[in-house]
Image (cartoon, helix red, strand yellow):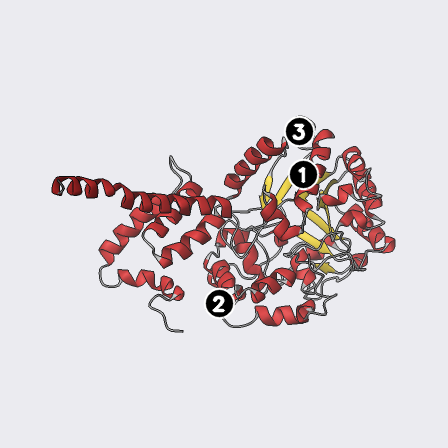
Amino acid sequence: MDTYYHPHDLGKFADMGKSNTELWDKFMAYYGAVFAEGALTAREKALIALGVSHAVQCPYCIDAYTQASLEQGSNIQEMTEAVHVACAIRGGASLVHGVQMRNVAEKLSM
Amino acid sequence: MGQTLIARRAPLASSRSQLEVLARPGPWPRFEERVAAAGLVPLTASGIEIFQINVGKFCNQTCRHCHVDAGPERTEQMTRETAEHCIRALAQTDIPTLDITGGAPELNPSFRWLVQEARALGRHVMDRCNLSILLVKPQEELAEFLAEQRVEIVASLPYFRPTQADAQRGEGIFDKSITALRKLNALGYGVEGSGLTLNLVHNPVGAFLPPAQQSIEAQFKRELARSHGIVFNNLYTITNMPISRFLEFLLDSGNFEGYMERLANAFNPAAAQAVMCRNTISVGWDGTLYDCDFNQMLELPVTNGLPRHVRDFDASTLNGRRIVTANHCYGCTAGAGSSCGGAVA
């Protein structure tokens, strides 16, 4: 079946460095530093990345950070909670804009 | 839990079939080529520090990832005569450690004799224990025997939650493991200052690499203490080897290529230099000599005119032997590496 996203295309990510090596190298150095053990553990960062992957709905990121979370020792219960955090923030972001809707409605209404 | 490959007459019960699958071309180089590119050929032993005996394939469990294809219906067991050859071989060397594995090694009628003889020789003895065996009749006194003999216990517990542990090892095994761990703790195993060592083994419950050993050890210590009041010494992470029942899982779940690629991409020359086969000799239930327990299951014995049976054991010729490798060896060289003693790099 032909699809817009192919899982094996993630392996071509480094091709993005072919037309601008300098920016690619800077991005990768930054990326590596972000995910290194720091004030947060690598396991916690992988769970955050998993949640963000769902918020931005990036299939490559979901594949990569599902695997990374498992390889960092997280379990399906923790990973499911991370996805719910993303869901709550996305849903909450819609709902909180109801305040804007109410502001506008209030202004327009008698 | 399902039956063994052999009981199901599955094609992968044959080591030849497994080797054929492992030799399939894929987007990864052959292991030998990868090792050569890293300048590590020939991969040779650096001496023998661990004398590992696999006393048989009989086991009270049928874990889904088992590289031995062990189970209750397996009948292969080391005889007393072969066990005596092992002790003679050990006695003629100064190899410091005897590592006993299986199956459930405790079910071999010669297990306690092997332990006592090796301890009488002053050797450190390790028992690779599945924990539930400590609760099986007539093994109730087994834990006390191990404690008396000061045997180091290396116990399998893939995860600190029942869902994951039972998915790999069988329904209800987690609860039995916890009961057995409490029994071991009560005897002093894993308790600081007791001198009785209790190490746990974590295998990933699926087609992915294990976490950093230190990090998952801290999680295990925190969770087992908090939820069950259990203590232990160290946690070893062991990568699942793409052979036997785990290979069947990889093929059935469509994960074989992805897993092999993951292992090969994570090849670590430092781990390759420190692989356990370099300081271990592995003895099969019938006395055949191998570089490791995985080669044993693939029926790849030591080669190049070396003594092939423990009755002909000669440490001087085996010490610097060339290691037999195939693509399954990627399992021991990925990431932080993997050995019977956990990560190596």
Is label 3 or label 2 in front? 3
Using the rendered image, report if marks 3 and 2 lie on a common chain: yes
Mark 3–mark 2 Cα distance, whole angstroms, equals 46 Å
Disc 2 element: loop
**Image quarter for residue A8?**
bottom left
**Image quarter for residue B115?**
top right
Is label 2 or label 1 in front? 1
Disc 1 element: helix
Circle 2 Cα neighbour tier, 10 Å, few/some/many (<14 / 14–19 / ≥20): some
Residue B327 vertical position relative to residue A99 in the rendered view, above or below: below
Res. B299 visible in picture: yes
| Chain letter for the residue marked with disc 3 in the picture | B
Residue B323 placement, left or right of B268: right
Residue A11 vertical position relative to residue A54 in the rendered view, above or below: below
Mark 3 and 1 residues: CB-CB less than 8 Å, in contact? no
Is label 3 or label 1 in front? 1
Identify the residue position indicated by label 1 in the image.
B178
Q: Nearer the viewer, residue B5 or B317?
A: B5
Report the quarter where the N terminus of chain B lies.
bottom right
Disc 3 element: loop
Query: What numbered label is drawn on residue B29?
Result: 2
Q: Nearer the viewer, residue A6 or B339?
A: A6
**Image quarter for residue B190?**
top right
Mark 2 and 1 residues: CB-CB less than 8 Å, in contact? no
Q: Amino acid at mark 2?
A: Pro
Q: Amino acid at mark 1?
A: Ile
Mark 2–mark 1 Cα distance, whole angstroms, equals 42 Å
**View extreme (front): residue:** A110
